[in-house]
């Protein structure tokens, strides 16, 4: 996020700027492919980081997708409004759309597979590995024998009392 903030909020030395673009996809004709790819990749890591931040591996995909898309749309809109206050930047709705599309594509491409991988590697689901240590044996003549009475098993609850007659 620090890198994204620095990229978006640094002032640009320009002699003049275009008017604000509020028409969706209108500025794509004048943009180069590198600019479009940069806008797609600006917030793309949030597509993976936001769903996994809560640590819920078994979350349903649709609420996770909608939550990630909504948060990324709010963040992209906030960044775009903040950048419009810095010199050389103007409000462009295409930047918001491309950032959200980048988050959505990243989420759909990586999160289901990562969750499956994390579920399979979760330590509680596999049987624990038992390490067998070799115990040195002693001759039978030297081995002391101790008789121990079995310990009473603690009860988890009190036994019911019989009904009084």
Image: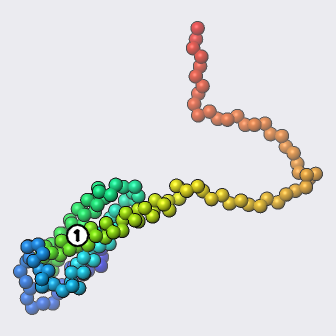
Q: Residue 90 versus residue 42: which sits nearer the camera?
A: 42
Which residue: 70% across, 34% down? Answer: 152
Q: Please identify the residue farthest to the right as the structure is shown.
A: 141
Q: Secondary structure at mark 1?
A: helix
Whether residue 115 is visible, yes or no, is yes
Q: Residue 24 versus residue 156: which sits nearer the camera?
A: 24
Which residue: 59% across, 34% down? Answer: 156
Q: How far across and down, in percent of the image, does residue 136 sit?
A: 82, 60
Q: How far across and down, in percent of the image, does residue 73 sit?
A: 21, 66
Which residue: 40% across, 55% down? Answer: 58
Which residue: 91% across, 52% down? Answer: 140
Residue picked out by circle 1? 100
Figure check: 60 above or below 117: above
Whether residue 87 is visible, yes or no, is no
Quarter of the image where the N terminus is located? bottom left
Figure check: 37 above or below 60: below
Q: For this view, does 78 lie left or right of residue 137?
A: left
Q: Quadrant of residue 10?
A: bottom left
Q: How far across and down, in percent of the image, does residue 28 sit?
A: 14, 80
């Amino acid at each position: 996020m620090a890198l994204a903030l620095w990229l978006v909020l640094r002032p640009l030395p320009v002699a003049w700027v275009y008017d604000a673009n509020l028409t969706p996809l209108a500025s794509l004709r004048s943009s180069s492919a590198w600019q479009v790819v940069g806008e797609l990749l600006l917030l793309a890591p949030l597509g993976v980081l936001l769903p996994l931040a809560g640590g819920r591996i078994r979350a349903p995909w649709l609420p996770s997708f909608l939550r990630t898309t909504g948060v990324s749309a709010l963040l992209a809109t906030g960044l775009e409004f903040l950048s419009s206050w810095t010199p050389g930047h103007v409000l462009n709705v295409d930047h918001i759309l491309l950032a959200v599309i980048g988050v959505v594509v990243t989420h759909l491409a990586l999160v289901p597979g990562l969750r499956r991988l994390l579920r399979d590697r979760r330590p509680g689901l596999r049987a624990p590995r038992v390490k067998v240590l070799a115990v040195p044996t002693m001759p039978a003549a030297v081995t002391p024998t101790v008789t121990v009475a079995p310990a009473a098993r603690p009860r988890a609850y009190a036994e019911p009392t019989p009904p009084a007659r």
